[in-house]
Amino acid sequence: MKRLFLFVAICLLVVNLFAQDICISTPGTSLVLSAPIGGDLTHVYYGNKLTDAEVRVIAQIEPNNRSAYPVYGLGGFGERALSVKHADGNMTLQMTVTGVKSNKEGNANITIIEMKDKVYPFYVNICYKAYQDVDIIETWTEISHQEKKPVVLEQFASAYLPIRRGDVWLSHLYGSWANEGRLAQEPLAPGMKIIKNKDGVRNSHTAHAEVMFSLDGKPQENTGSVIGAALCYSGNYKLRIDTDDTDYHHFFAGINEDNSSYSLAKGEVFRTPELALTYSKEGLSGGSRNFHKWGRTYKLAHGNTLRKILLNSWEGVYFDINEEGMNQMMNDIASMGGELFVMDDGWFGDKYPRNVDNSSLGDWVVDKRKLPNGVAGLVKDAEKHGIKFGIWIEPEMANTTSELFEKHPEWALKAPQRDHVLGRGGTQVVLDLANPEVQDFIFDIVDNLMTDNPEIDYIKWDANMSITNHGSNYLPKDKQSHLFIEFHRGFEKVCQRIRAKYPDLTIQACASGGGRANYGVLPYFDEFWVSDNTDALQRVYMQWGTSYFFPAIATASHISATPNHQTFRTIPLKYRIDVAMSGRLGMEIQPKNMTEEEIILCKNAIAEYKTIRPVVQLGDIYRLLSPYDKLGVASMMYVSPEKEKAVFYWWKMEHFCDQHLPRVKMAGLSPAKQYIVRELNRIDNSPLKFEGKIFSGEYLMSNGLEIPYTHTVDYHKLNDYSSRVLYLEEVK
Ligand code: DGJ
């Protein structure tokens, strides 16, 4: 009896000890935390999937003194995830675990670790959502209190992750308007690396809220351990990587608290945006594949539905919109095999017609002088041509020269006692999305368009101004610091209403080009416009960077005119097509200015793209040779999940005589499968030597194919560009 009692007691003790250790798992990864009731929540491990036995051992041997969510005030002086000011002036927190809850949500397991301050009725829930079909764990926090007066949140990161020092390299994206998504890779060094945005409206022009850490030295695309992180937020963010005197890099990610301290009322729950974490043993491309799969399956509107091939009117006609011109463009794209036409800026405004960019935003009525039969007339024309119709709007904005501004000047953001700081066209202002009336107005823009013209298939939603006036007429005086946060809450509310009523609509997130490539908006948007720069050569760099986090299905990539309107570079059509075909293919050109030969080339490319579209848009990415490595060529490929089809891209990046370009080895194929190789968009007089030949995946991945440096075309057609798209199909 005594023995039995002892045995039960030991068992209970063991269960209790293990109950402290929480293992959050996805198919290939584990995150281990120590969460003793009444004790501190600490981070133990994040990496490759562990067995139960390993979790038990690791929990005992790994140092577990690193807080999983460091708070400010007591002990230590390092960077913190959360810092607050209680109403009594106390600036400290001391959080201990009070409970752990778990449940299932669809295909994911949710774990919530509840914590309470030792003294104050102040609560933090650390939440994890572990997907069971993709290696992504989302984490966020819910902060609340029952103190008598508001508590001011000074810093409120979504998450913290310690990363073991060694030879850790950071990959992140930077850039500017017309040069978005540039890849930067650097070893983490002592000191603080900050990646941030303060635009207020758009957040991915100058930096991105997504990063990858290569843990085994210089980043490799298809080998090595990688941790990836993507903050799912559409507003200002701050990512901090602090390398101090410890063994760890300290990674924090969340809303940018600058000018945004938040007064949290009793009972209110402040939910931070999710930080999506991934871990891969297959290098940076492995990390990308995880983000892409998760993005398509869970984050992107219609992430698994193939996108239509479209013509957008912007670079073709700019503001010169008229019925005849639109009809001609619709006819042209339809005859090339396209499936959708999008009328861009310039179609609206009654009292103030939108002829240039200095008026009319806010007046979302058709300019009957340009379009006597309204949008309905265009929709009919589209139907006649057998294609769908889409339309451009910029709903969050107004111009001071607009009927809207005359009626509702108080809806524009502006600091009291100050004049407006004006944006695009010298007259643009940002509307106050914190204001529910403004939210209704914006919802109605879409609702009215769709009610009048239910056939509208696609909306290009633009946003061309930052918040340059800190002031909301709607928010009370003591909540002006909530402006940036409330703007994005308002934006999200509008998006939710639109999606609830119009679930099937395709919506593009455009924001002066690539200003809204983030996983905060993508649940409501199908895709984003990568950049206003459509120059194919520069696009290779931008789309390469963007592909780190976002799948091709979301990456709008258009064939445009030459010389290019942004860089004035002259690039042959073949190369422009071959670059555009690596993303969501579209056209941004005036077809009536194209030669017959060019039309035929595009028609053929559109037909070829339809064949490869499922592989490009739903396949797995393998980046092979980076344009950033400056080896004269860039190359990547998509492979279908079953590995029976693949598309290989090869773009020459520079041109010199006696140049020696590397031979590119393929990746991601099945070594044992046999593939027949066919070149797409061929312009050469004779086929490539390997055209129609069959190779094993093993051969293609060990040796690659010898790609000729130039095209064999007639002398007068020779130029300095060269590119190839190869389609591989399994032969059984
Ligand atoms: C900025 C966008 O990025 C462009 O594609 C175009 O839609 C213009 N705005 C229209 O004003």
Image (spheres, rainbow, N blue to C red):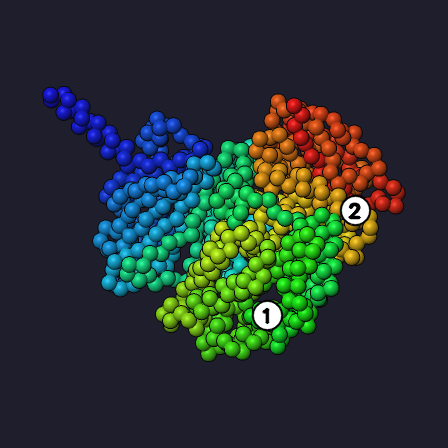
- Quarter of the image holding residue 62? top left
Residue drawn at (47%, 60%), measured in percent from left and top? 494
Amino acid type at mark 2: Ile
How far apart are the two marked residues, 1 and 2, measured between alpha carbons?
37 Å
Residue drawn at (38%, 72%), measured in percent from left and top? 477
Of badges 1 and 2, nearer the viewer stands: 1
Image quadrant occupied by the C terminus: top right
Residue farthest left in this picture:
1
Residue drawn at (73%, 63%), measured in percent from left and top? 325
Residue 319 is left or right of residue 480, and the answer is right
Numbered mark located on residue 600 in the image? 2
Say which of 68 and 286 sits in front.
Answer: 286
Question: Element under label 2?
Answer: helix
Amino acid type at mark 1: Val
Residue 262 is left or right of residue 346, and the answer is left
**Residue 495 picture location, percent across and down:** 48, 58
Say which of 332 and 87 sits in front.
Answer: 332
Determine if residue 205 is in view.
no
Residue drawn at (66%, 39%), measured in percent from left and top? 612
Mark 1 C-beta closer than 8 Å to ligand 1: no
Say which of 580 and 364 sits in front.
Answer: 364
**Residue 397 picture location, percent across and down:** 54, 67
Question: Element under label 1?
Answer: loop
Mark toward the start of the polypeptide (1 vs 2): 1
The residue labelled by disc 1 is 365
